[in-house]
Image: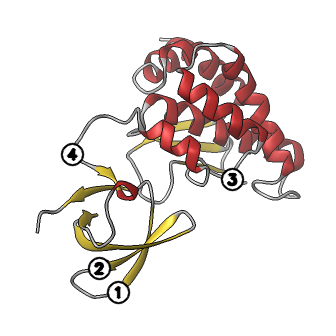
Amino acid sequence: MDKLTFFSETLSRFAPKEFIPYLTKLILEARVKFKIVPGRKTKLGDFRYSELSDKPTITVNGDLNPYSFLITSLHEIAHLNTFRKYGNSVQAHGLEWKNAFRDLLEPILISKSLPDDVEKALWKSFVNTKATTCSDMALSRVLKKYDLENDTIHLESLAKNTIFALNKKKFKKGDLRRSRYVCIEISSGKQFLVHALANVRLISE
């Protein structure tokens, strides 16, 4: 099996089918080790370069919904393109990266192949690009609508003082601070900041 077929067939299980040719082309042209990995709690994807390796490495979580997977992949490819052009002389999510990311986003935006809500949220993000998808609340909220259905709900939808479960621990929801809620862990009484769009499970008292 040649590389084009391999990547196309692999990506078809993770990304929207309309954008498989585009994403496959980008990965092959990037000359990068592109790995799909188990979901991580701290990040959706990352880009790494080591002088000990012959190629840079991009990893993307395999548990993302198709549109989140596509955008995260483009986010990391933008890091790669920025690194190859500027090295480590610019900020990780500075103007150079933002321009690289916008260059990759533009073809999918003008394709008219995205759901209307995703397209609108991406256009707004395109104008004011954030460092991460999670920090762009409007875009993140739209993308989460396409997650696989399960018994979880977003923390922001719960009333204050509601008891919920997250990562096998129980918490009580508190006040909002910017994009995160102050939550009290039931067992220890410690405070934690939990993202408003975190997937949590409601616990009946």
Q: Is residue 117 above or below residue 2?
A: below
Decide: few, some or many residues near mark 2? Use Cα within 10 Å; few <14, some 14-19, many ≥20: some
Labels 2, 3: front one: 2
Residue 63 in picture, x, y percent from top left: 38, 40
Q: Is disc 2 in contact with disc 1, using a CB cutoff of under 8 Å?
A: yes
Give the SS element for disc 4: loop
Numbered circle sitting on residue 131: 3
Which residue is at 16% across, 63% downward?
A: 203
Residue 156 point in image, percent of width and height: 40, 57
- Give the number of the mark in front: 3 or 1: 1
Residue at the spot of label 1: 190
- The answer to which quarter of the image holds residue 4 is top right
Disc assigned to residue 151: 4
Residue under numbered circle 2: 185
The residue sitting at 68% across, 54% down in the picture is 50
Mark toward the start of the polypeptide (3 vs 1): 3
Q: Amino acid at mark 2?
A: Glu
Pointer 1 local density, CA inside 10 Å: few below 14, some 14–19, many at least 20:
few
Crowd around label 4: few <14 · some 14–19 · many ≥20 (10 Å): few
Q: Quadrant of residue 192?
A: bottom left
When asked about the image quadrant of residue 198, the answer is bottom left
What separation in Å lies between label 3 and label 1 (alpha carbons)? Answer: 29 Å
- The answer to the question of whether label 4 and label 1 lie on touching residues, with beta carbons closer than 8 A, is no
What number is the disc on residue 65?
A: none
Could you give the CA–CA distance between mark 4 and mark 1, rounded to whole angstroms?
A: 26 Å
